[in-house]
Image (tube, coloured by chain):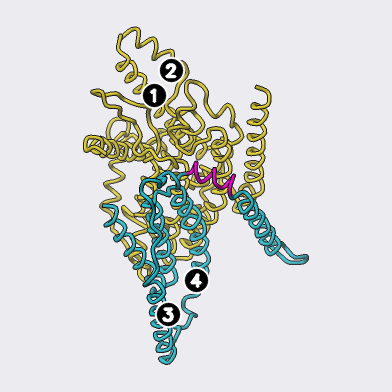
């Protein structure tokens, strides 16, 4: 059951991720990216990491992608003046070759890797739950956790600095 | 999971779905009646006794109107938009505990569709998705006013989600659990969270108004400036879906507020009543079932009071200006929510220190 579910989710993820790149319309791309985030959250749930799944939805699908959509909707307002992007045949061929080479290298690299297995007897199925995650974050990884919060604070201060009114500038 | 449990869950989910739709339907009727009462009018009174069939008449009218899709609009997204709004609105009632536990034939039946240990995060995630229906519909209409409405909806929802999340954190600090059932159980009797979190509740309430796009924060559809906002181009049942989703959102957010702050299905002297009933009926099972059913009634009473409050405010307060809305969200509610977190943390530490 969960294996077929995994294959379904994985193929859906790949399909939507491809559609993000292929779609001509940027709004469609963003919507496919949102679906991709949902399918990735589905993978997290299959791995019994419910907290990660919920936070992925809240932060990425719920906040960041709304801002993406927001910005792209603004850009799209001047659709008529926008010219069709033309790609020359030469760059298309070059892109195909480069992409194909990367694909070959990836397959060659991944072919012989051993997937880290797990011991079914010692495996803790509760490892992805909120409680165990909180305990680990506040004991073992306390310093990285606090440093990340400092990083966020710096980013926030930077954003406020960029968005601040300059003297003499008109805002309304 | 046993097939009997699965069957029970399936029936329960269908019943909750039906109740949600029924309440949303009659919310439209009561909105008009309450508006009429506040404005000293009669309100709808033609369809059926006291106008009770008015929602059906409205739905019939919407179904038979021309289903219009504007030229040069993005057709698929134009149709998907109201669908997403409706889907997301009906999703969040899944984790709300509408009652405690019924015992039928020795089987414990919890009156909650799914019990997850991330219930609060689930609600929060679904709420944050609610804006997509509005944004997609507004953009797909290919109309400047629709787009402006959609953009207003997006920025408003993102701004108020922050304050909402911060006010929730204080509740989570008290309860120490993300499961809505745990939070409900901790408020047994009259030990409701509102006594500990009055400031948090007020912040949450204001954010709930903004998240459901209700007056005084209904700027995405403010008809004086934007014709009809994001649903300007919509007609027939697609418009009906948008309006309906708003009422479902009100119901769900009322249920969430009742669960988080007003003790969910708990009512004063609940435990005493159960003991007394056990003595009278000489059966712990019957007593438990009676108290649980009373609890469900109390829960819905609380929800109806909140829905009434939403309507009362709509016909009392004028709409905010957009800069006032942003100022309230970012400069007043978020600092207040952070202050609330600090006060709650201090209170918890002080309680540990003193007792």
For mark 4, name the chain.
A
Dot 1 lies on which element?
A: helix
Mark 2 belongs to chain? B
Question: In x, y percent, where is residue B235?
Answer: 35, 56
> Residue A106 vs residue B199: left or right?
left
Decide if residue B36 is in sight here. Answer: no
Q: Name the residue under label 4.
A: A77
Residue under numbered circle 1:
B295
Give residue A7's position: percent from left, percent from top. 30, 61
Q: Distance between the residues labelled 2 and 1?
A: 9 Å
| Vertical relation: B42 (above or below) A171 | above
Q: Nearer the viewer, residue A85 or B353?
A: B353
Residue at image location 51% in from the left, 31% down from the top: B261
Q: In which quarter of the image is the C terminus of chain B?
A: top right
Which region of the structure is painted magenta?
A: A130-140
**Chain the render paints yellow:** B
Q: Are marks 3 and 4 in contact (CB under 8 Å)?
A: no
**Mark nearer the N terminus (3 vs 4):** 4
Q: Which mark is residue B270?
A: 2
Residues marked 4 and 2, same chain: no
Question: CA–CA distance between discs 4 and 2?
Answer: 59 Å
**Marks 3 and 1, how far apart at CA:** 62 Å
Front disc: 2 or 3 = 3
Which type of secondary structure does the marked residue at label 4 adopt? helix
Image side of residue B161 versus residue B299, left or right: right
Instruction: Give the colour chain A carries in the figure.
Output: cyan
């Amino acid at each position: 059951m969960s294996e077929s579910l995994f294959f379904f989710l994985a193929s859906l993820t790949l399909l939507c991720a491809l559609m993000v790149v292929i779609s001509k319309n940027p709004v469609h791309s963003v919507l496919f990216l949102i679906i991709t985030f949902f399918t990735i959250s589905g993978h997290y749930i299959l791995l019994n990491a419910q907290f990660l799944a919920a936070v992925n939805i809240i932060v990425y699908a719920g906040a960041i992608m709304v801002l993406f959509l927001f910005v792209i909707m603004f850009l799209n307002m001047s659709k008529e003046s926008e010219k069709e992007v033309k790609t020359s045949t030469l760059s298309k061929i070059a892109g195909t070759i480069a992409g194909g080479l990367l694909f070959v290298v990836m397959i060659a690299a991944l072919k012989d890797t051993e997937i880290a297995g797990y011991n079914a007897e010692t495996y803790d199925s509760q490892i992805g739950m909120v409680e165990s995650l909180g305990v680990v974050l506040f004991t073992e990884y306390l310093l990285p956790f606090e440093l990340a919060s400092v990083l966020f604070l710096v980013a926030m201060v930077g954003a406020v600095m960029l968005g601040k009114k300059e003297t003499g500038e008109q805002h309304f | 999971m046993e097939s009997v449990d699965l069957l029970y869950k399936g029936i329960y989910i269908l019943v909750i779905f039906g109740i949600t739709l029924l309440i949303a339907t009659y919310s439209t009727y009561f909105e008009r009646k309450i508006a009429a009462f506040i404005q000293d009018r009669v309100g709808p009174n033609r369809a059926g006794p006291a106008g009770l069939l008015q929602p059906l008449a409205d739905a019939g009218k919407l179904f038979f109107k021309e289903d219009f899709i504007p030229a040069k609009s993005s057709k698929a997204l134009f149709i998907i938009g109201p669908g997403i709004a409706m889907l997301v609105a009906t999703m969040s009632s899944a984790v709300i505990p509408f009652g405690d536990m019924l015992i039928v034939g020795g089987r414990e039946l919890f009156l909650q569709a799914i019990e997850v240990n991330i219930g609060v995060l689930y609600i929060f995630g679904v709420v944050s998705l609610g804006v997509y229906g509005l944004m997609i519909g507004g953009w797909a209409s290919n109309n400047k006013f629709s787009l402006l409405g959609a953009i207003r909806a997006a920025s408003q929802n993102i701004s108020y989600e922050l304050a909402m999340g911060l006010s929730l954190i204080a509740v989570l600090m008290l309860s120490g659990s993300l499961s809505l059932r745990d939070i409900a159980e901790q408020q047994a009797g009259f030990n409701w969270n509102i006594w500990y979190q009055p400031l948090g509740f007020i912040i949450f309430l204001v954010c709930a108004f903004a998240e459901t796009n209700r007056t005084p924060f209904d700027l995405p559809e403010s008809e004086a400036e934007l014709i009809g906002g994001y649903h300007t181009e919509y007609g027939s049942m697609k418009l009906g879906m948008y309006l309906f989703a708003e009422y479902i959102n009100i119901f769900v957010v009322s249920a969430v507020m009742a669960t988080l702050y007003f003790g969910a299905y708990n009512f004063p002297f609940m435990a005493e009543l159960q003991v007394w009933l056990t003595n009278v009926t000489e059966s712990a099972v019957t007593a438990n079932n009676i108290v649980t059913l009373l609890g469900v009634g109390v829960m819905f009473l609380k929800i109806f009071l909140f829905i009434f409050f939403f309507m009362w405010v709509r016909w009392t307060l004028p709409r905010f200006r957009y800069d006032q809305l942003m100022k309230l969200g970012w400069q007043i509610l978020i600092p207040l929510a952070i202050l609330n977190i600090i006060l709650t943390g201090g209170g918890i530490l002080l309680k540990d220190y003193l007792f």
